[in-house]
Image (spheres, rainbow, N blue to C red):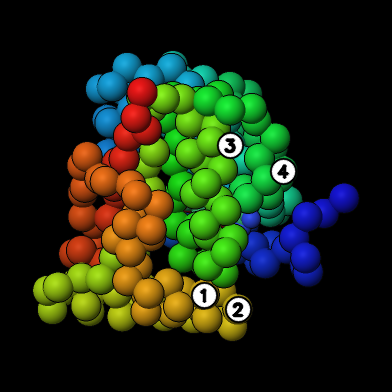
Amino acid sequence: MRLFPQQDPYSHIARTYDSVVGPFLRPIRREICKVVLSQGYGSFLDICCGTGEQCEMLARLGLSATGIDLSPAMLATARAKSSGLVCYYEEDASRLHFSEESFDAILISLALHEKAPDVRDAIVREALRVLQKGGMLMIVDYTAPASTCGKLSLAFLSIAEWFAGSEHYAHFRSFMKSGALDALLRKHNLSPMRRSAFHWGATALVLAGKQP
Ligand SMILES: C[S@@+](CC[C@H](N)C(=O)[O-])C[C@H]1O[C@@H](n2cnc3c(N)ncnc32)[C@H](O)[C@@H]1O
């Protein structure tokens, strides 16, 4: 059974994603490794893991890493290069099969902006459900940059979002219009404990804890 409603929207990019998009994300991935290791977390879930780059990096550093994604093509790329240390599941992030409080650290990277608002909210709620009390939710997504460089960077990244298709782009536009990552955090009562800006402020990694 295939869970995407239509054809897998990532089938065209899955094989080239790591070489085309990967270099732009490398500094974020390194920062995530640093954070997760410094906190001494043992288990890590990447929701919408794509080609599994972040899972593989953390698994090589000794973490128990799990990735879920809805795209068979992205998961095929992840599995093809896998060290064998990561568990991958093809499933919908808004309906995870894991039980409550299963993971110490959870990441949602560059996936929420492309979803309709109700799906976006359901994914965040699921992440919080399966996160341990005292654990860390990490979200990487677009923000509203203040500087000219940030605005130019966002304009450049918007072109990539446009190429991803009309539905994807419409959701991206509504995400930005609604206040982007910061509005989403407020909506879910998540107060960032730490925030790192990337791409001149067009994207950010935020860390939010779940109260023990
Ligand atoms: C832009 S990619 C980001 C991949 C990865 N997180 C990264 O940072 O490179 C977005 C990913 O979200 C996945 N995705 C979209 N909707 C999903 C859903 N409802 N459940 C699980 N994965 C989903 C897509 O298949 C795609 O792999």
CB under 8 Å between discs 2 and 1? yes
200 versus 57 height, above or below: below
Q: Residue sitting at 30 percent across and 49 percent down?
A: 205
Q: Label 4 belongs to which residue? A: 90
From mark 4 to mark 3, how far is it between C-alphas? Answer: 9 Å
Q: Nearer the viewer, residue 198 or 83?
A: 198
Quadrant of residue 39 within the rendered picture: top left
- Three-letter residue code for mark 1: His
Q: Label 1 belongs to which residue? A: 171
From mark 2 to mark 1, how far is it between C-alphas? Answer: 6 Å
Q: Which mark is residue 167?
A: 2
Nearer to us: label 4 or label 1: 1
Where residue 114 appears, x then y in whole percent? 52, 67
From mark 3 to mark 1, how far is it between C-alphas? Answer: 23 Å
- Three-letter residue code for mark 3: Gly
Q: Quadrant of ligand 1?
A: bottom right
Dot 1, crowdedness within 10 Å: few (<14), some or many (≥20)?
Answer: some
Q: Label 3 belongs to which residue? A: 67
Q: Earlier in the sequence, mark 3 or mark 2?
A: 3
Residue 30 is left or right of residue 45, and the answer is left
Dot 3, crowdedness within 10 Å: few (<14), some or many (≥20)?
Answer: many
- Three-letter residue code for mark 4: Glu
Q: Is residue 4 visible?
A: yes
Residue 88 is left or right of residue 118, and the answer is right
Q: Earlier in the sequence, mark 2 or mark 4?
A: 4
Q: Secondary structure at mark 1?
A: helix
Residue 52 is left or right of residue 97, and the answer is left
Q: Residue sitting at 64 percent across and 27 percent down?
A: 99
Q: Residue sitting at 52 percent across and 46 percent down?
A: 125
Q: Earlier in the sequence, mark 3 or mark 1?
A: 3
Q: Secondary structure at mark 4?
A: strand
